[in-house]
Amino acid sequence: MRSAFKWTGVTLGVIVGLIVLGTLSLYGIGQWRLKRKYDIPLQNIALPTDADSLAEGRRIFQYRGCEACHGEQLQGLVYMDNPAIGQVITPNLTTGNGGIGSLRTDAEMARAIRHGIRPDGTPLLFMPSTEFYFLSEEDLEKALAYIRSVPPVDNEMPASQLSFTGFVVMNITGAITFLPAEIIPHEKQAPTAPEPRVTAEYGAYLSMSCKVCHGLTLSGGAITGFPPEWPAAPNLTSGKGSRLPSWGEAGFVELIRTGQKHGRMIGAGYMPWTSYRHMTDDELRAVYLYLMSLPPKDFGNR
């Protein structure tokens, strides 16, 4: 009997040891991924200075969700604090104290936006460059010109960081894009942006950020890695569980403009309609056309 207990204890000890070793290995792999360097050449960029371009740059900055992450004054925000993952913190983009505006060249800022790379070549955590990689040169230059025009704000922000479990999670799940630089085809030329018209193709260009919460198929469901109190993302296709077909184009535009439909208010803390409302009517019509062109998916079939 004692021998059986002894071997049971030894077996459990080995299992625990293997789990600890495996966990530490995953942590180490995560550290390596964070320190990996990417050799992405800097590209010349020419920023416009005219008032119309700066105004359009501000609108792009708003409807692309940049303002929702970095703040109305570009001062930086604690976007998410989840012990299981870590802290998602956006930097101060201005030239004020604590800001990176005076520490980055235009070319370095453009590379960070489009490729998710720091000046030293290491990848940025959680920077959604998988969306911005597809930005047209014109949109990128106008948005960056607007960033450069914002008055300095004094606000020192710590960098985003992963918790210990966050390091483990980043190595066992592909559902959360921790380091977008890892999946961007840096060596390829970004596809040409479509003409700004009311087309499904242009709607796809405008709605890249929707996939972060609604999934690659845009069918919605629980959002992996987000706090459990967050509601599931709705189905944006015309499949089962979607309300978009019954709302129609006009109802969709109204929803984005006002944040409510049929008396139900959308929480701006979950769905950033306050960003998307800065789109023009034609842009929102293009987005709706794109969503209705998608293959119908049942709710949650991400």
Image (cartoon, rainbow, N blue to C red):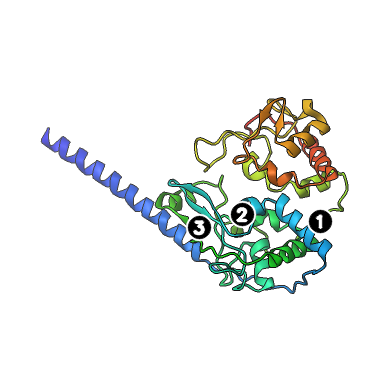
In contact (CB < 8 Å): disc 2 and disc 3: no
Q: Is residue 172 above or below residue 43?
A: above
Dot 2 or dot 1, earlier in sequence? 2
Percent coordinates x, y for residue 201 in the rendering: 82, 46
Residue located farthest toward the left when viewing the structure as drawn: 2
Q: Nearer the viewer, mark 2 or mark 3?
A: 2
Front residue of 225/284: it is: 284
Quadrant occupied by the N terminus: top left
Q: Label 3 sits on what residue type?
A: Ser
Query: Could you say whether the residue bearing mark 1 is in a helix, strand or loop?
Result: loop
- Quickly name the residue at label 2: 71
Residue carrying label 1:
193
Disc nearer the start of the sequence (2/3): 2
- Vertical comparison of 194 with 32: above or below: above
Alpha carbon separation for disc pair 2 and 1 = 27 Å
225 relative to 133 in the view: left or right: left
Indicate left or right for 100 with 188 as reference. Answer: left
- How many numbered marks have been drawn onto this rendered protein structure? 3
Q: Which residue is painted at 54% across and 58% down in the image?
A: 125
Say above or below: 271 vs 135: above
Residue pointed to by mark 3: 160
